[in-house]
Image (spheres, rainbow, N blue to C red):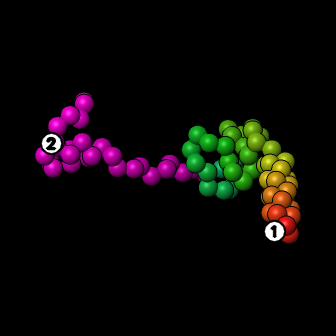
Amino acid sequence: MVVRMRHTRAHTANRRSHHALKAQTLGTCECGAVRVSHRACASCGRYRGRVIVDVVAKAAKKSKKAAAKNAGSKSEAGK
Ligand SMILES: [Zn+2]
């Protein structure tokens, strides 16, 4: 519906009655970690019993990136 004119507080409240946020549906992974439903596990990278995400490689990549970023900021601070 197009919002064209001023409308009453009741009208606004009725529209906003559908704006509430829902809690995430959490489940437990087979590794024992709490996991968001329909998402791969953040701690083991499994989804429906299969390894989807290589968690070790991802962590290594992340730490390498962080190290590179720190080195870059250090050299800039030295200037
Ligand atoms: Zn898991």
Image quarter where the N terminus lies is: top left
Residue shown at the point (17%, 37%) measured from the top left: 5
Q: Is residue 28 above or below residue 51?
A: below
Left or right for 54, reference 16: right
The single residue placed furthest to the front in the displayed view is 79
- Which numbered disc, 1 or 2, marks the residue closer to the eye? 1
Left or right for 43, reference 65: left
Give coordinates of residue 6: x percent, y percent: 16, 42
Q: For mark 1, does the 10 Å Cα neighbourhood hold few (<14), some (14 to 19), or many (20 or more) residues? A: few
Residue 62's tag is none
Residue shown at the point (62%, 42%) measured from the top left: 39
* Amino acid type, label 1: Ala
* Amino acid type, label 2: His
Residue bearing the label numbered 2: 7
Name the one closer to the observer, 73 or 61.
Answer: 73
What's drawn in magenta, residue-wise? Answer: 1-28
Q: In this view, does 69 lie above or below 51?
A: below
Residue 74 at least partly seen: no
Q: For mark 2, does the 10 Å Cα neighbourhood hold few (<14), some (14 to 19), or many (20 or more) residues? A: few
Mark 1 / mark 2, whichever is N-terminal? 2
